[in-house]
Amino acid sequence: MKLSERFLGAYDAVRECDVSFFTTPMWDGFRSDLENTFLPNPPFSFLRNPTILKTMFVTAGGRWMREELAYLEGHMPEKRLRELLAEDFAGDPYLFNAKYMTSHNTIHTLYHLARHSAATGCDLEDIHNVVEWGGGYGNLARIFQRLGSPSLTYTIVDLPIMSMIQWIYLSSILGEEKVRIIQTPEVTLKDGVINLLPVCHLKDYQPRGDLFVSTWALNESSENAQKYVISTAWFNAKHVLLAFVKDASESTKADLIQKAAADGGAAIEPIDFIPDNFYAFL
């Protein structure tokens, strides 16, 4: 049976679990929009869905993309960039660059990692365990599979509908044997694969990482969620990569995570071409 035909049945196992402690009204609305689109079966071109494009797939192009790509070309050999940027066609992503056959979103995602390496001296190829809070459709995990060690363990904590979107995207590209969705607390996290952990099951697990990553997702989570992650010391990770927006709205407060990161020694750096947006690198 095709992955898309199994989507609804797999989602039914996690769709009713309570995420209210971690989420915000903004993401409650996005979650409803995504369910309306992806159920019962995801469309082939799901990466062109308006909610996906609004929340997790950058299509700005222009100066923004040119500056990110110029930075990458200044920090990585062309052959390596071609390997890392080449787009997989699951979900039918918009392509913005013919030289690398890639989307702006993949350029944007790899740029986060390059900036982190430059700021911290951390060689991402030496990272063996990653915990990501809010993984979008799974693009950063896909890139890390190309970048990191063959034994990489990667855990994405997210809303159940997002865990399912990650499941269908990553399984389509990597094969189901490399993707493990935690539908019930009886299912254990597994080394050497991408673990998809719905946030409602987080209390039953203790994921640990060499690197903790959250690009805007923790910023858009509840204050309870931010305090929880901070209380774990970023899931005991030595290295941290955060991106966040300084915004006064109730749905995107960043003061807690910025202070915790800075107090822990992280460097706070502006994202020059995205006003009021910042990285925290440790």
Image (spheres, grey):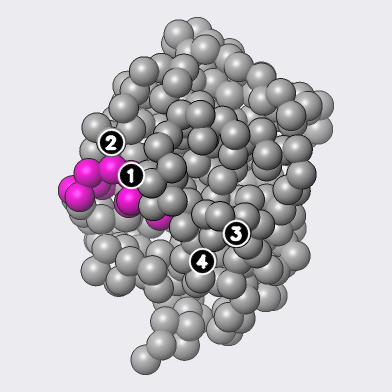
Residue at 47% across, 88% down: 5
Q: From the viewer's perspective, is residue 194 above or below residue 88?
A: above
Locate residue 190 relative to residue 123 in the image: left or right.
left
Query: Tag 3, which secondary structure?
Result: loop
**Residue labelled with disc 3:** 98
Check disc 1 and give the amino acid type. Leu
| Residue sitting nearer the eye, 110 or 170 | 110
Q: Is residue 262 positioned above or below 99 on the image?
A: above
Q: Which residues are magenta?
A: 142-153
Q: Image height check: is 194 above or below 184?
A: above
Measured Cα–Cα span from mark 1 to mark 2: 6 Å
Give the amino acid at mark 3: Ala
* Sequence order check, earlier mark of 1 and 2: 2
- Position of the N terminus, as image quadrant, is bottom left
Circle 2 residue: 125
- Judge whether residue 53 is colored magenta: no
Q: Choose the circle earlier in sequence order: 3 or 2.
A: 3
Give the structural element (helix, strand or loop) at label 4: helix
Callout 1 touching callout 2 (CB < 8 Å): yes
Residue 165, labelled with which disc?
A: 4
Q: In 3D space, how far apart are the residues under numbered discs 3 and 4 (Cα atoms)?
A: 27 Å
- Upstream in sequence: badge 4 or badge 2: 2
Residue 38 visible somewhere in the drawing: no
Q: Nearer the viewer, mark 3 or mark 4?
A: 3
Give the residue pinned by disc 1: 147
Residue 96 seen by the camera: yes
